[in-house]
């Protein structure tokens, strides 16, 4: 049984770190943030729901906490912003052990410390069933410089950071296997422990490289469609150019094979950056691989198309993750 709400909040407060931009945090009705002069606020919120985004019999709580914060940080990265504070609303059922909550917080707060993002507040509640965690991340960006989804223009090239498909492939493997016995999240693959591309996003914004940008949470095809829709353009993707992740188990394999194209195109949960640009783009930014995978086209009846390995073109239909999608 978790601690009482008052004791749980006090425990979280002791573990959370402050920041020079945090005037007041946990312990009052509202947090007070000091916004840098000449900056605009970025605010994003993301749910992590048991049975939808994670399963307790598959994922250690540290990993779930880390991925919970990653979702918010990745959104800030996609705008080219700097994260300033995080807020966590956590609802747990009465049968969830306090040890699980503590380990969840360890994963979340370890990542927050890595990016120097204070946990500045939130809420706690008892749920009727399972666990729901809502993360809010506040960031900032110099006024008028945020990289938005509307901005891609015909002739721009399309780029992605890192490798795609690894998280979706490992999730598929988990569905086919027995529950994982590992008790430490460090034994899981890098694909299930994504690293928010904050540094890459800031460089793309600061150097005015990216004309439009989005983070890859729902899948390459789905997120590219978002940019096409907001920018009123089409897109062409070269299947052979997509940087596939390598298949591996939780502690790795000696000779991993390339992840299937379907996972790379539609899998989701990569938390890499997808952006468009008409500028010269380095092959590595902040130590992260950057790959050109296609180009932006004028809008047409076939909004997106895929060029197969044999050079043939076919429509590319968005098929990533979508809540409330009819089956």
Image: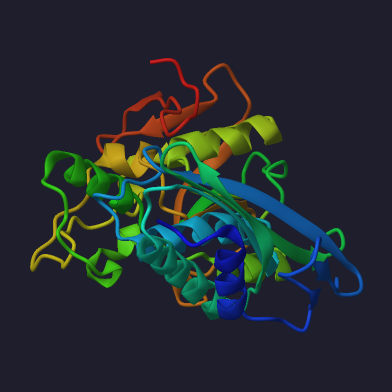
- Visible residue check, residue 289: no
Front residue of this view, candidates 162 and 57 = 57
Q: Quadrant of residue 144?
A: bottom right
- For the point 52% across and 79% down, the residue is 114
Position of residue 208 measured from the top left corner of the image (x, y, whole percent): 72, 64
- For the point 71% across and 48% down, the residue is 148
**In which quadrant will I find the C terminus?**
top left
Q: Residue furthest left?
A: 254
Q: Considering only vertical position in the picture, is 283 above or below 97?
A: below
Q: Residue furthest right?
A: 37
The answer to whether 53 appears left or right of 198 in the picture is: left
Front residue of this view, candidates 52 and 126 = 126
Count of marks placed on residues: 0
Position of residue 36 measured from the top left corner of the image (x, y, whole percent): 86, 74
Front residue of this view, candidates 246 and 99 = 99
Q: Quadrant of residue 262?
A: top left
- Visible residue check, residue 239: yes
Position of residue 268 measured from the top left corner of the image (x, y, whole percent): 40, 43
- For the point 29% across and 53% down, the residue is 166
């Amino acid at each position: 049984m978790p601690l009482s709400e008052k004791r749980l909040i006090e425990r979280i407060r002791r573990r959370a770190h402050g920041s020079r931009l945090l005037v007041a945090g946990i312990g009052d009705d509202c947090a007070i943030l000091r916004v840098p002069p000449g900056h605009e606020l970025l605010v994003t919120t993301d749910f992590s729901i048991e049975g939808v985004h994670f399963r307790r019999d598959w994922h250690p709580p540290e990993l779930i906490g880390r991925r919970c914060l990653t979702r918010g940080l990745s959104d800030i990265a996609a705008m080219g912003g700097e994260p300033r504070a995080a807020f966590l609303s956590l609802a747990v059922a009465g049968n969830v052990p306090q040890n699980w909550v503590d380990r969840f917080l360890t994963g979340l707060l370890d990542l927050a410390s890595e990016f120097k993002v204070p946990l500045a507040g939130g809420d706690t509640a008892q749920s009727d069933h399972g666990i729901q965690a809502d993360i809010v991340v506040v960031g900032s960006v110099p006024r008028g410089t945020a990289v938005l989804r509307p901005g891609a223009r015909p002739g721009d090239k399309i780029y992605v950071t890192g490798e795609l498909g690894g998280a979706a492939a490992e999730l598929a493997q988990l569905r086919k296997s027995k529950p994982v016995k590992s008790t430490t999240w460090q034994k899981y693959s890098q694909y299930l422990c994504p690293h928010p591309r904050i540094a890459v996003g800031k460089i793309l914004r600061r150097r005015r490289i990216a004309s439009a940008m989005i983070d890859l949470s729902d899948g390459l095809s789905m997120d590219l469609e978002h940019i096409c829709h907001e920018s009123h353009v089409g897109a062409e993707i070269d299947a052979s150019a997509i940087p596939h992740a390598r298949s591996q188990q939780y502690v790795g394999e000696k000779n991993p094979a390339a992840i299937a194209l379907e996972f790379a195109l539609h899998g989701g949960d990569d938390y890499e950056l997808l952006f468009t640009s008409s500028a010269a783009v380095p092959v590595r930014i902040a130590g992260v691989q950057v790959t050109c995978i296609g180009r932006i086209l004028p809008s047409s009846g076939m909004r997106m198309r895929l060029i197969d390995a044999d050079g043939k073109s076919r429509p590319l239909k968005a098929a990533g993750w979508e809540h409330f999608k009819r089956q």
